[in-house]
Image (spheres, helix red, strand yellow):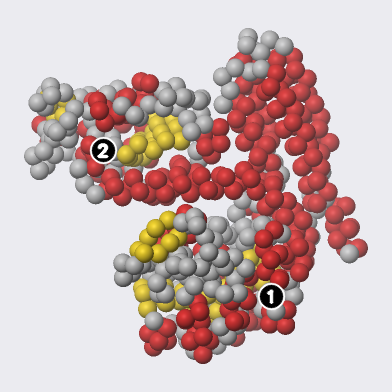
Amino acid sequence: MKYSPFYTLNLGAMATLQQPAAAWLKAQQPDLADIDTRIGLNRWEILDFRLKDGRTIFESMPPGPFYQGWIPREQTPLDATFVIGSNLGYGINQLLSNTRDTHKVYVLEPDPEILAVCLGQTDYRPFIQMGKLVFLPPDRNLLLQTVRNCDTQFLFGKIYMRADMPSQQIGPDYAYWTRECKEMLEHLSVEMGTLRRAQDIMVGNELNNFRRALSDGTVNPLRDAGKNLKAVIVGAGPSLAANGPALAKMQHSALIVTALQTLTAAQRVGIKPHFCMSIDFSDSMLNVFKQLDPEFVRDIPLIYSTKTKQEVVNQYPGPTIPLWTVGGLATFIAGTDDLVLDAAGNVSVALMRFLHWMGVKDITLVGQDFAWRETTHAAGHHSSRNTSQYIELKDLEGNPIRTSMQYLTSAREMEQDIKQLALNVRNIYGGGYVITTASNSSLEQAAEEGFLTSEGPALELYRLRMMQARTACEQPVFEERGPSWRTSLRHAHKRMEKLFKKADRNHEEIRSLFGSLHMFLRQDPIYLPYLYNEIMDIAGLRDGVTRYTAKEIQRFKAVSKKVMEKVEFMDYVLGSRSLKAHRAA
């Protein structure tokens, strides 16, 4: 049997659209001649592929039963499916033939030989060219970015993950990528749920903090201030009670950092951090002040995400320094030398990234359990409690422990950071989640290895830089957008009302107008973060509606009204009126 000519044609179509799998596969140089000799009919009289150990992929069962449940019963225009493992394309072809043209199919195949087999058997060019079918190489960052780009599908459709069972027998890579993809999709679910619910709150907090943050200063002087420093990140896990007092006696010259909500727990075990951090945008952070000792923290700087609630920053008794984070105003207005941190969703992960930016290489973790047996946190933490919602895990010795999806996601994010940032991390293990990329250690071992002793005057240099960080920044003024935006949206309203009078006939024109509106709302990078929900709503009206009715134009009017309310508020905060009010205060 001659090797199918579709391989070259499909690879060319992928390369034209710059699908990364094309360059990856070309670099792997699979032996097409050898592959050709191993393709043939099996005992079921279907096309099969013989693996190098002599087995064929479908020798035990024909493909049909494996893919019976792959097709969604109810489909929307904005569905997507991630497939791990392609085999000869049987599952992929089932999806392509039985889903809408708008249903995205992403296929991650970790074995270049198997991907070459798949691409050789079916002409996928029409599906590749229309953007329905995308092949992915085994690249974690690329998979993560692809998952994150499915925000519209998550909000207005459904995302499915299909692990190709026949591929699992080929090797362990398939189970690994199945687990990675599953965790990324679960994280997207948490992230999108938070964004959809809380984006207005987070950016609203940032707007409320805007003028004060610029007056408080900038973390920029701390860049490289961590060179020659040894750092300790103190968490509020249950093991802090056991390890905290010993750390308090051997702090030596390490830089001790923690979360704002951990300060009381740290004080109870005798630890006084050099600075604390807050990234939480919720009202619950105000509970911290019910236990916080003002005198204890009066000289501990708080590095606060500008998305932190304004009242939390205002109530903090000590020095406050802003931290601009990804997904807000600074993403678009910060200078090239300004730090805009991806703070993730966990303050310990954010602290680790911040320390890395400071130039710290050696980090010790204390109280970073990410799991529990009875209570979730050490005494003094405002969230310390029993909980009935958990995931079962085992500790280092095989004993049962509990964690949450949020903790699990954060722990694995920390593991990835340690590896990717090439950090040297000691975890003072206290019976919780095993951080696989850190070395488990005792405090005594960490001290003996020099992990608690910074070099030379490094800590004094840090203190000097921290004083410099408290220098006020220039207060910019932005031009108001409200008048021009109101005029443009008024014109769009009139056009939309005319088209909706004969909505069925004008379906494509209505969809096109929603597309133009989507581009219009995204035109201004400064205003874009606060308009996130409205931008997504317009995307849903553009791509997620099969038939336009009066309901959709009412949704559009409600979105437009909300847009103008937000733009006018931003005009006030970013414009000259806010600056005058700030100076008067």
* Residue 92, quarter of the rendered image: top left
State the image coordinates of residue 308 (x, y, percent, origin top left).
68, 60
57 relative to 270, above or below: above
Q: Where, quadrant-wise, is the C terminus in this rendering?
A: bottom right
Q: Residue 75: give its label.
A: none
Residue sticking out furthest to the right: 584
User: Which mark's residue is nearer the viewer, 1 or 2?
Assistant: 1
423 vs 457, left or right, is left
175 vs 98, left or right, is left
| Element marked by disc 1 | loop
| Element marked by disc 2 | helix
Q: Earlier in the sequence, mark 1 or mark 2?
A: 2
309 relative to 258, above or below: above
Residue bearing the label numbered 1: 292
Looking at the picture, which amino acid does disc 1 mark?
Answer: Leu
Q: Residue 165: give its label.
A: 2
Give me the C-alpha separation between circle 1 and circle 2. 54 Å
4 vs 183, left or right, is left
State the image coordinates of residue 377 (x, y, percent, origin top left).
53, 69
Q: Where, quadrant-wise, is the N terminus in this rendering?
A: top left
Which residue is drawn at the image coordinates 58% and 78% (left, top)? 266
The front one of 190 and 531 is 190
Which residue is drawn at the image coordinates 47% and 30% (left, top)? 79
> Does any portion of residue 227 appear in the rendered image?
no
Which residue is drawn at the image coordinates 50% and 77% (left, top)? 240
Crowdedness near tag 2: few (<14), some (14–19) or many (≥20) residues, C-alpha within 10 Å: some
The front one of 216 and 159 is 159
State the image coordinates of residue 244 (x, y, percent, origin top left).
51, 82
Crowdedness near tag 1: few (<14), some (14–19) or many (≥20) residues, C-alpha within 10 Å: many
Looking at the picture, which amino acid does disc 2 mark?
Answer: Met
